[in-house]
Amino acid sequence: MPRVDLLQALGARIVQRERDGLLRRLRAIEAARGSRVLVDARELLNFCSNDYLGLAQHPDVIAALQHAANEFGVGAASAHLVSGHHREHAMLEEELADWTLRERALLFSSGWLANLGAMQALLDRDGVCVQDKLNHASLLDAAKLAGCALKRYQHADVESAARQLASADDAPALLATDGVFSMDGDVAPLRELAALCARKNAALMIDDAHGLGVLGDDGAGSAADAGLTQGDAPVLMATLGKALGCAGAFVAGRRELIYGLTQFARTFVYTTAMPPALAAATRAALRIARNENWRREKLRKLIARFRVGAQQLDLPLTASRTPIQPLVLGDSTRVLHAAAALEERGILAAPIRPPSVPRGSARLRITLSAAHEEADVDGLLDALSGLQRA
Ligand SMILES: *Cc1c(COP(=O)(O)O)cnc(C)c1O
């Protein structure tokens, strides 16, 4: 048998993906102002950004980035443990720990790296990782790369999680869940999962990429919102590229956890530190996210307005109280057509298809932001009702 040519094989998979209506397309945003973006020289109202609090373009955040770049330069120029760790990183870590009511926090350059680093440090082939079926891809891949057993449970089903945990006997166990599910917007049953972990001596890990800044009284996230302490949810991970409008991620927890990650998280040790100017910008974003409650309040009102309007139009809403408000249409082609028709009407909404979501559950993933106005939401609803009539 001749050796298979890898690039030819990749080409064949692309052809198949196109046949299935699942081909993805990279599009360049030419300019961004608030919730408006310029794409193909047309201004569109953006309903697929994760900038939930409208901080990505906040003047204080931009000024902090510029000021720190003047002071430190652009890149960190080495890993944290070499000479890449700056004062801005250290202060951001302190402020993140303080916000999330944890002892310590450790920065990573992205959420992917944070999840992978934490799992590789905590788990090896003797361990087991129990995960919700709808967890983010980075959690699933992290467990695979950690080499532990991976057991997935039915979405948000605590009984199913208990069965998976029980089937792992006495193996050291980490139960990992999204706090807010990224494609559905629902919140995990965190209190019940924490109780299960306490009973079974497993550690609970929450990936709060979509909860931080959005849930909890001062935006401390889904764990705080559920009243879970550091003892209840000992491994807390969240990203800085969503509600905080910056980039990067962190893991927070007890001092011992953070020391351990500093030693053993390979994606922390062997990578260049995030730019110090970005840490400074994130500090500015954190201050606003924590203190300006009106942003969460405004967001809640916009979410409620959208849901009432969507119900009146009989649109297929999910049970979500977060800014993630997907409309599950099912068929990939239908979702592509809907996204294209919305774009005709000046609205950008992401068509999300398998394998990002399970087969038969393709959707328009609509996200709301404090950068939107009521009139924007009304415009979206108008456009959606236009689709129904078309
Ligand atoms: C976005 C996301 C990540 C990855 O974070 P990045 O910083 O974008 O790499 C991880 N988990 C969840 C749930 C996410 O939504």
Image: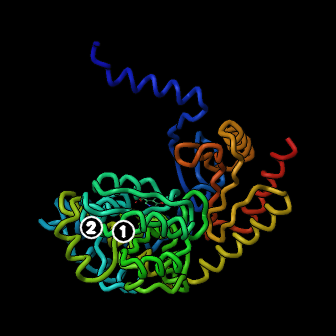
Residue beneath label 1, please? 174
Seen in the picture, residue 158 relative to 124 is either above or below; the reply is below
In the rendered image, the quadrant that contains the C terminus is top right
Residue 274 seen = no
**Quick one: SS at disc 1?**
strand
Q: Residues within 10 Å of mark 1 (few under 14, many from 20)?
A: many
**Residue at 44 percent of width and 53 percent of height:** 137
Seen in the picture, residue 232 relative to 241 is either above or below; the reply is below
**Residue at 59 percent of width and 30 percent of height:** 20
**Quick one: SS at disc 2?**
helix
Mark linked to residue 208: none
- Quadrant of res 274: bottom left
146 or 26: which is nearer to us? 146
In the rendered image, the quadrant that contains the N terminus is top left
Task: Work out whether mark 2 precedes mark 1 in sequence or the reverse, and give the earlier one.
Answer: 2
Residue 316 image offset from top left, x and y in percent = 76, 55
Seen in the picture, residue 248 relative to 343 is either above or below; the reply is below
Q: Is the residue under label 1 in contact with that under label 2 (CB below 8 Å)?
A: yes
Q: Give the image's coloring scheme.
A: rainbow
300 or 314: which is nearer to us? 314
43 or 185: which is nearer to us? 185
- Quadrant of res 264: bottom left
Q: Left of 301 or right of it: where is 354?
A: left
Residue 307 seen = yes
Seen in the picture, residue 40 relative to 248 is either above or below; the reply is above
Ligand 1 found in image quarter: bottom left
279 or 334: which is nearer to us? 334
**Residue at 32 percent of width and 77 percent of height:** 92
**Residue at 70 percent of width and 68 percent of height:** 373
Residue beneath label 2, please? 122
Distance from disc 2 to disc 1, alpha carbons, whole Å, reads 8 Å
Amino acid under disc 1: Leu
